[in-house]
Image (tube, rainbow, N blue to C red):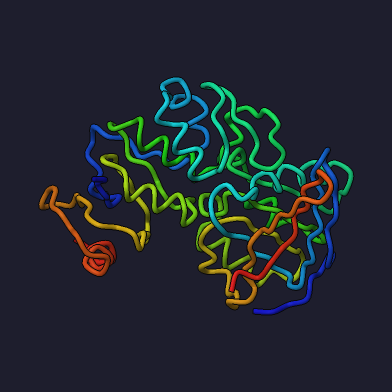
Amino acid sequence: MKIKPFITDRIQTKHTSFKVDLNLENNVTFINGESGTGKSALFSFLEELAVEDKRIRCFNYLDYKKSYKNSIKRSKGKLFIIDNADILLDDNMRSFIAFDGNNQYIIIGRNPTGLHLNIDEVYELQNQEIDGITLFTLNKSF
Amino acid sequence: MITVYKKKNIPKNMQLISLNDIYFNKYTVEILDERAAEIIKIIDHSDMLNKYTISSRFNGTVLNIDKLSTGCKTVLNIMYNADSIFDICECGDNALDVVYSLPDGNVYCSYPFISFEMKKVNVFDKQGIHEIDSYEELKEWWINED
């Protein structure tokens, strides 16, 4: 289900020798890929960015027992970044996110089922090293 | 070979671990040995420096071992804890291939999650343990209700 991003179409940040430059084409951006490609590292850099950017809220496995679901459902104008989505997002939340007209999402996980995404809305993280700096960008998975 | 469980048939004396990161950081890390280094190299392309540190695949800096990927931690949890069952739903394809190549271990996933490299697994259901050696048969077993 292709919907233009509600909050932003680009995220850029820097963390020591890492740079992040993500072009966001859809309101829900699902990132998957092999283990060990830097997905959770990316999450930690975006978590740091969220300290300065009030539009961004981050959740991962550390929030498993917290009320992140209600927080998402009550919010407006936020960019939610969710790591460990296979654990955190049940069918109900996936359906909510797919039809949420108030917020934008970057979801990191393995299984995009229930988010009503087209195959070309699933992305993989790509990294390249330039002069000692590791740059993370997004590439379509298929 | 690994044994695959369905949720309703998990034996009472075994626990199902879904939060692989936390379990690894708390328990598995204490029992790692040189076997872990090979797994870490294969999946995360990192070098294990000692029980608590690895070198980053990106820039070689020394990192706490808690920075391993969830997929890598899941494989290590399965390898080192034969008395528990681990949810493999967060494994990438590379970690999944390693899971299915392990000589033993116990796994669970709420949907069929099978490596194309699979050769043979045990499955545990109400009939007990039995062996499956084909992808299609395993998928069918996983989908079917007992």
Name the quadrant of the N terminus of chain A.
bottom right
Name the quadrant of the C terminus of chain A.
bottom right
Q: Position of residue B8 (x, y in %)?
A: 26, 50
Q: Position of residue B21 (x, y in %)?
A: 52, 37
Identified at 57% across, 29% down, the residue is B65
Q: Position of residue B121 (x, y in %)?
A: 22, 52
Of the pair A23 and A97, the residue shown nearer to us: A23
Identified at 32% across, 46% down, the residue is B107
- Of all residues, the one furthest to the right in this rendering is A52
Judge left or right: residue B28 versus residue A39: left
Identified at 69% across, 50% down, the residue is A71
Judge left or right: residue B124 versus residue A43: left
Of the pair B7 and B32, the residue shown nearer to us: B32
Identified at 53% across, 63% down, the residue is A92
Q: Position of residue A106 (x, y in %)?
A: 70, 59
Of the pair B35 and B110, the residue shown nearer to us: B35
Is residue B11 positioned above or below A134 on the image? Answer: above
Figure quadrant of residue A103: bottom right
Of the pair A35 and B58, the residue shown nearer to us: B58
- Of all residues, the one furthest to the left in this rendering is B127
